[in-house]
Image (spheres, rainbow, N blue to C red):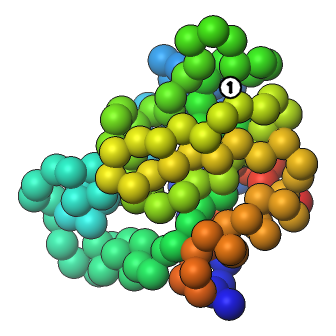
Amino acid sequence: MGKVRFHMTMTLDGYIPGPNQGPDKPFGEGTEHLNDWMFKLRCARELFGQEGGETGASDDVFREGMANIGASVMGRNMFGGEPGPWGRDPWNGWWGEDPPYHTPVFVLTHFPREPLVMQGGTVFNFVTNGIESALGQARAAAGGKEILISGGANIIQH
């Protein structure tokens, strides 16, 4: 059985998203540069289908952290959109048509939704019956590889 990893940017004083998170502010207000370090790295740029980027110790650590991932778990806020029911034209995530996951992703939510199949092998599965169920489904989908918990803060508290 693969390990469960946690990967998230956090400020030194313990904040993850800022206030008023929404579709136009994925990390909330005051966090515009929180992930600048990551988006400069070659490994992160590759995940988003981009070329170039910095190499070195930070890139090596990030690359190692992203290796051998078979499935991911995230919360509704990490996936994005407005709170509440999904609505007629539901949100499809922050990442465009080819999200950087390339594996099954299990999104914890209170609102049911059909799986969302994206390019590159990413399938967002919406789980309404708790973290234990999401982790169980992720373990089954990961096929012995590791599981990445990529956010948000509420997921880690469970």
Q: Quadrant of the N terminus?
A: bottom right
Q: Quadrant of the C terminus?
A: bottom right
Question: Which amino acid does the dot numbered 1 rest on?
Answer: Pro
Q: Is residue 94 visible?
A: yes
Residue appearing at x 36%, y 33% in the figure: 96
**140 vs 62, nearest the viewer:** 140
- Tell me: 68 left or right of 45: right
Residue appearing at x 45%, y 32% in the figure: 94
Quadrant assignment, res 87? top right
Residue appearing at x 64%, y 63% in the figure: 149
Looking at the rendered structure, the secondary structure element under dot 1 is loop
Quadrant assignment, res 47? bottom left
Question: Which residue of the protein is positioned furthest toward the left in this rendering?
Answer: 52
**106 vs 58, nearest the viewer:** 106
Residue appearing at x 34%, y 75% in the figure: 63
Q: Is residue 77 visible?
A: no
| Residue identified by numbered label 1 | 19
Question: Which residue of the protein is positioned furthest toward the bottom in this rendering?
Answer: 1
**14 vs 104, nearest the viewer:** 104
Query: What percent of the width, then of the height, locates residue 106?
Result: 66, 53
- Tell me: 137 left or right of 121: right
- Tell me: 4 left or right of 108: left
